[in-house]
Amino acid sequence: MMQATGGIERLLRFAREKGILEAADVRFARNALLSAMKMDAPAPADVPADWAPPPTATPILEELCAAAVARGIIEEDAFSRDQFGAHLMNLLTPPPSVVSARFASLCAERGVEAATDWYYAFSRATDYIRVDQIARNVAFSAPSPYGELDITINLSKPEKDPREIARQRAMPQVGYPSCQLCLENEGYAGRPGYPSHETLRTLPLTLGGEAWRLQYSPYCYYPEHCIALNERHVPMSISRRTFDLLLDFVGQFPHYMLGSNADLPIVGGSILSHDHFQGGRYTFPMDRAQPWTRLAHPDFAAVHAEAVRWPMSCLRLRSASREALVAAADALLSAWRIYSDPQADILSESGEGRHNTITPIARRLAGEYQLQIILRNNRTTPEHPLGLFHPHEDLHHIKKENIGLIEAMGMFILPGRLRAELTGLRAYLTGARRLDRPQENDMLHKHYDWVETLAAAHGTGLSEDEAERVLREAVAAKCVRVLEDAGVFKATPQGDAALLRFLAVAGFRPVRA
């Protein structure tokens, strides 16, 4: 009981010092925590005056979860601990109306950047943003012909415990919330197979006259990784309205970028059923890419346009006028929707449906609005049944999933299995393991042809650090290939000529220097 009481008092102190809990609410919150811990009364457990609260509530919640397991309140698996920890933190977290009012007050008094600084710190402190799990990720940058790429091996989403999987299988199917982005998630306790959102607090947002919400991603892949989501459960759809919404957002939050995944399978993100955008405060590798030609359109003199030297076909449009920028972007989208060029393998539609769409990203830069528009096509062929403009089969041992907004801009989120697999491959390059083809059930089997090529180029007597460098650079080379496969017009003289053919149809022509 002493362990539980000490944890309760430290959690209360933490919440007070982080501005989560008001002094007048401490007694009420203490009793709520006692009830959750199945305790009738607290035991004496003073927190030392010089006690320094941790950056987030995680270590205190872990201590209380361990006590709850010992007292038979919860099971020992990871889901039960996560769910119970979120429940304890929710008992101290103010309701959505209070959080929204605080954000609005900060916006009015100190500006929107100070308000998002507070909201981000709040979301981290309440453990909604899983800072501890994000820290497990393996992140590095590696050179490429297009500039440095950002690569993350994603270890932040924990593996499911077999006991959790068994419980999930036995649970009845539930259709609530409708999806992971619906507003019904706010405060939802979760269930086996569906994570807790008890400490989620979203902010009301108006975009293009529509009701939207803002929140941070619980597994931030980059600083202040946020999600803007439609209050209605409506599917993703790219249109002129999309540009209006994106530019409206960056007009309100000029320190953030905001982009949309494409609205078609294969080239879209993992959730197409709920209209949403992703943003944050980060400069992506694509943002640093240089133009290879400047463009002009006779109808949009106020818009500066350029084609970007990037493995995916990217057009960058800038203007001080939102209206002109939206009109120019819509002209580009309208032309692309119906554009076909069989010589370049581009078909706008087939018996499978329409194929051409875009991935748009908005920013404010030096007083101007910017839209970067990545051209996408989701057609399949017998040779490439998962997508012609999708990572081809020889890359699937590294990356098989859809190339969404984040990867398209040069930040790769790779599966967590790669950490152990790259460690195993390192043993080949250092000579700790013989360069023999492993059995088919060995996790390294799918990588063997690749590592054999690396060993031929670099030898098998590398130091651990040398082997790590070689593997990271080789992973980056695979990531470049992923982007090149996903690019509709290849970054070659022939591809550049094909892109210019399309741009001419859309009314954009190169500007002579």
Image (cartoon, grey):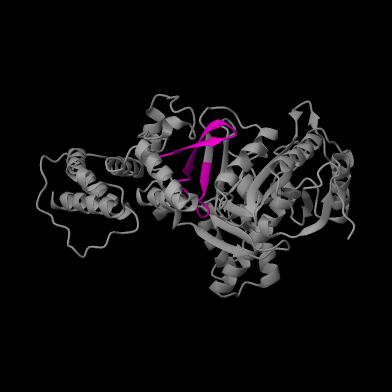
Residue at 54% from the left image edge and 54% from the top image edge: 281
Q: Residue at x 77, y 41 (%)?
A: 328
Does the magenta portion include 202?
yes
Residue found at the far front of this picture: 109
Choose top left, top right, bottom left or bottom right for residue 401.
top right
Q: Nearer the viewer, residue 271 or 32?
A: 32
Q: In the rendering, at what x and y percent does residue 352 appear?
A: 75, 27
Task: Report the number of numbered marks.
Answer: 0
Res 170 → quadrant: top left
- The range drawn in magenta is 199-227
Residue 61 placement, left or right of 207: left
State the residue in front, 12 or 267.
12
> From this viewpoint, is residue 315 visible?
yes
- Tell me the quarter of the image containing the C terminus: bottom right
- Residue 49 sits in quarter: bottom left
Looking at the picture, how far across and down is residue 355, in whole percent? 75, 34
Give the side of residue 463 with respect to residue 80, left or right.
right
